[in-house]
Image (tube, rainbow, N blue to C red):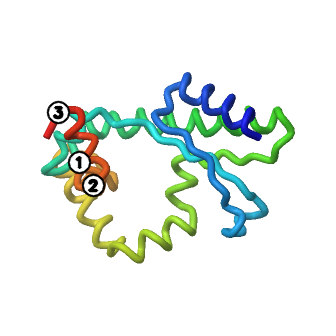
């Protein structure tokens, strides 16, 4: 299994992943799946620094580009694992956002409807897009703040 994860990690990093991790999800009872691959791609620090007051066109463009890259990476991982005889399911960004587990944990932290409404109003005001995108969660995240300091943006 270590060879498989090592090979898959290398493949994902070579294709643009910033982070790739593997986890045991057997306790979640997710349709019989017992393992997962978690992926991340960096949002450029300057783009994050620009969303202090709400979304920017640059953030919106990066959001779409990076989500597309995440989808491609998820599909690549699915293909890699399937070709080696493993049961795999690519959870694309759309599928992840709509998953019940994500919604449940998110709703325990924030008033989802108020957040969505505010984000849509702010996106329209700042970039004239009818979308739910503001970036505030990312901008204020302690991990993001550490990243921005490391990149000398803060």
- Residue 57 visible here: no
Residue 152 x/y as whole percent: 17, 33
- Quadrant in which the C terminus appears: top left
The answer, for residue 9, to whether it is visible in the render is yes
Residue 27, x across and y down, in percent: 69, 69
Report which residue position mark 3 lands on. 152
Q: Are marks 1 and 3 in contact (CB under 8 Å)?
A: no
Q: How far apart in space, not on screen, are marks 2 and 3 (Cα)?
A: 15 Å
| 9 up-or-down from 113: above or below | above
Measured in 3D between alpha carbons, the distance from the residue under mark 2 to the one under mark 1, in whole angstroms, is 5 Å
Residue 6's image quarter? Answer: top right
Q: Residues within 10 Å of mark 1 (few under 14, many from 20)?
A: some
Residue 32 location, quadrant: bottom right
Towards the viewer: 89 or 33: 33
Judged left or right of residue 61, residue 24 is right
Check if mark 2's residue and mark 1's residue have beta carbons within 8 Å. Answer: yes
**Which residue position holds label 2?**
142
Q: Residue at x 70, y 53 (%)?
A: 35
Q: Does 95 appear above or below 15?
A: below
In the rendered view, tell whether residue 128 sits above or below residue 84: below
Which residue extends farthest top?
A: 14
Residue where numbered disc 1 is placed: 145
Task: Give the residue drawn at x 32%, y 64%.
Answer: 116
Q: Earlier in the sequence, mark 1 or mark 3?
A: 1
Q: Earlier in the sequence, mark 2 or mark 3?
A: 2
Residue visible at 75% across and 46% down in the picture: 88
2 or 88: nearer the viewer: 2
Q: CA distance from mark 1 to mark 3?
A: 10 Å
Residue 153, located in which quarter of the rendered image? top left
In percent of width and height, residue 105 lies at 47, 71
Residue 59 x/y as whole percent: 27, 39
């Amino acid at each position: 299994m270590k060879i498989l994860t090592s090979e898959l990690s290398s493949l994902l990093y070579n294709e643009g992943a910033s982070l790739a991790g593997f986890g045991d999800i057997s306790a979640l009872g997710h349709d019989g799946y017992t393992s997962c691959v978690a992926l991340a791609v960096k949002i450029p620090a300057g783009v994050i620094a620009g969303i202090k007051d709400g979304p920017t066109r640059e953030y919106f463009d990066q959001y779409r580009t990076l989500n597309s890259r995440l989808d491609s990476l998820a599909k690549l991982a699915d293909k890699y694992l399937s070709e080696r005889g493993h049961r795999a399911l690519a959870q694309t960004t759309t599928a992840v956002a709509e998953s019940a587990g994500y919604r449940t944990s998110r709703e325990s932290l924030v008033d989802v409807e108020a957040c969505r409404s505010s984000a849509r109003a702010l996106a329209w005001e700042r970039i004239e897009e009818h979308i739910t995108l503001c970036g505030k969660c990312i901008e204020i995240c302690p991990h993001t703040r550490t990243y921005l300091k490391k990149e000398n943006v803060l």
